Image (cartoon, rainbow, N blue to C red):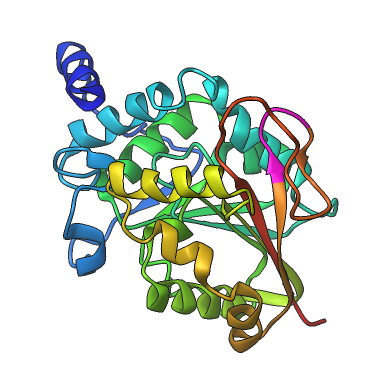
């Protein structure tokens, strides 16, 4: 029902995605890129056709991403809180945002660190087209590349920070491990990894409801992420200090431990995966 409503709204007001004549940033698409089967085999979020088929699907996802959060993520509050609270306070030379989608995670990174080169990487060409247009409209100079997060092709040691938001839970374990290896390769000595995603909270009712959400929302890899030993996978990838910490999207953002605040209502157990490349 949600996607039918979003599709109808977008269909009634669909505007072509255009590129500015003199862009601030850069968009690089790869028509020959082979999309992995785990990405195309089903409609993630139950969105018919997924986000990668055409321009309309990207705009439908942009609207649906707002509706599914019941307007609680208006102006992408969660993503801004991640950029403002989960990243070590330092000057970054280059930030790589994996699985950037239509840019909602990438814009706050550029605003928080305007001096940094910010690169968004995603598999879906329509999302990247939309991300580029939205960035240019906001006056943000961001580079968008159609690449696989498991193998970006970017130079080794070129990034000080590698991020993602809600990417890992949509990948199978082997792709998660490959993405961590790629992040370690991209990071310069002392560079940091910060990935916003989900983890089991340790509260049985909440965790059962959360696991079932993965089934209802057509996200088959979500429960598996919560069962992986991410600290061990980080270490195997060449990253140290791998750990999950809690993220309170309605309050302080990143929390110091993997303990969520008590709430009377059910909520997603947002969490931040933290690790770093040895100096």
Location of the N terminus (image quadrant) = top left
In this rendered view, identify the residue nearer to me: 142 or 34.
Answer: 34
13 falls in the magenta region: no
One can see residue 80 in this view: yes
Q: Position of residue 16 (x, y in %)?
A: 21, 25
Q: Locate residue 129, reporting x and y percent.
A: 31, 41
**Which residue does the image show at 51% across and 39% down from the upper left?**
24
**Side of 262 where 95 appears, left or right:** left
User: Does residue 60 sit above or below 277 in this rendering?
Assistant: above
Q: Is residue 138 above or below residue 144?
A: above
Instruction: Tell whether 273 sits left or right of 215.
Output: right
Q: Where are the magenta residues, as a range?
A: 247-251
- Give the image location of residue 196, x and y in percent: 60, 51
Q: Which residue is found at the position 25% from the left and 43% from the top? A: 51
Q: In the image shown, does 185 or 48 lie closer to the viewer?
A: 48
Please tell me whether the stretch drawn in magenta is mainly helix, strand or loop. Answer: loop
């Amino acid at each position: 029902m949600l996607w039918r409503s979003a599709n109808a709204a977008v269909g009634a007001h669909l505007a072509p995605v255009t590129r500015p004549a003199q862009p601030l940033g850069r968009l690089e698409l790869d028509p020959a890129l082979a999309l992995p089967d785990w990405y195309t085999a089903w409609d993630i979020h139950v969105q018919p056709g997924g986000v990668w088929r055409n321009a309309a699907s990207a705009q439908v996802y942009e609207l649906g991403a707002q509706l599914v959060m019941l307007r609680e993520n208006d102006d992408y509050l969660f993503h801004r809180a991640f950029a403002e609270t989960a990243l070590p306070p330092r000057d970054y030379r280059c930030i790589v945002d994996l699985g950037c989608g239509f840019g909602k995670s990438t814009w706050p990174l550029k605003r928080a660190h305007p001096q940094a080169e910010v690169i968004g990487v995603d598999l879906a060409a329509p999302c990247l087209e939309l991300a580029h247009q939205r960035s240019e409209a906001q006056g943000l100079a961001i580079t968008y590349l159609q690449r696989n997060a498991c193998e970006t092709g970017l130079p080794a040691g070129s990034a000080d920070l590698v991020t993602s938001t809600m990417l890992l839970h949509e990948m199978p374990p082997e792709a998660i491990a490959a993405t961590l290896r790629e992040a370690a390769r991209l990071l310069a000595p002392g560079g940091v990894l910060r990935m916003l995603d989900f983890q089991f909270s340790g509260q049985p009712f909440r965790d059962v409801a959360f696991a079932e959400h993965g089934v209802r929302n057509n996200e088959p890899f979500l429960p598996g992420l919560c069962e992986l030993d991410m600290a061990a996978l980080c270490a195997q990838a060449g990253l140290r200090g791998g750990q999950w910490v809690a993220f309170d999207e309605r309050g302080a953002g990143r929390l110091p431990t993997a303990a969520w605040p008590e709430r009377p209502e059910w909520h997603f157990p947002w969490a931040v995966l933290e690790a770093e490349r040895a100096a």
